[in-house]
Image: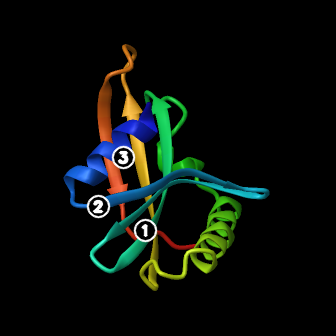
């Protein structure tokens, strides 16, 4: 549900979604999109409430390294896509009724 909310959010911001849930043996990328001339790999974290921390606290440096490796593989296999690459994160918080409570988008996250 969080990934659907994130994809709709990105579309409204002018992103073109080109792939979702791309899996490679060692990693997965939730959303792959293009905005202007940038290929954007998006990690989505969804939580019900904030009792156990923010969604972004669940993105470890190991997870980011895995996303980078998976993104590099994706780009190598899709050379016609834009050469400028970026990794974003979207944190989704749902309330107890599974309704959207908060959605935050961080562009260009780094290790």
Q: Earlier in the sequence, mark 3 or mark 2?
A: 3
Dot 1: few (<14), some (14–19), or many (≥20) neighbours within 10 Å? many
Dot 2: few (<14), some (14–19), or many (≥20) neighbours within 10 Å? some
Observer-nearest of 38 and 98: 38
Q: Are marks 1 and 2 in contact (CB under 8 Å)?
A: yes
Q: Residue at x 49, y 29 (%)?
A: 51
Where is mark 2, residue-wise? 15
How many angstroms separate mark 3 from mark 1 (CA)? 12 Å
Observer-nearest of 58 and 84: 84
Q: Residue at x 63, y 75 (%)?
A: 77
In the rendered image, the vertical position of residue 18 relative to residue 85, given as above or below: above
Q: Are marks 3 and 1 in contact (CB under 8 Å)?
A: no
Q: Earlier in the sequence, mark 3 or mark 1?
A: 3
The numbered disc on residue 7 is 3
The numbered disc on residue 75 is none
How many angstroms separate mark 1 from mark 2 (CA)? 9 Å
Q: Residue at x 29, y 43 (%)?
A: 8
Where is mark 1, residue-wise? 40
Q: What is the x, y in percent for residue 54?
A: 47, 43
């Amino acid at each position: 549900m969080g990934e659907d909310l994130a994809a709709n959010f990105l579309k409204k911001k002018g992103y073109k979604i080109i792939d979702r849930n791309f899996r490679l043996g060692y990693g997965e990328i939730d959303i792959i999109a293009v905005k202007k001339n940038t290929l954007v790999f998006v990690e989505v974290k969804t939580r019900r409430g904030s009792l156990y921390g923010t969604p972004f606290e669940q993105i470890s440096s190991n997870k980011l390294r895995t996303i980078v490796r998976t993104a590099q593989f994706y780009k190598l296999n899709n050379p016609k896509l834009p050469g400028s690459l970026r990794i974003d994160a979207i944190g989704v918080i749902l309330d107890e009724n599974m309704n959207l409570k908060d959605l935050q988008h961080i562009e260009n996250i780094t290790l």
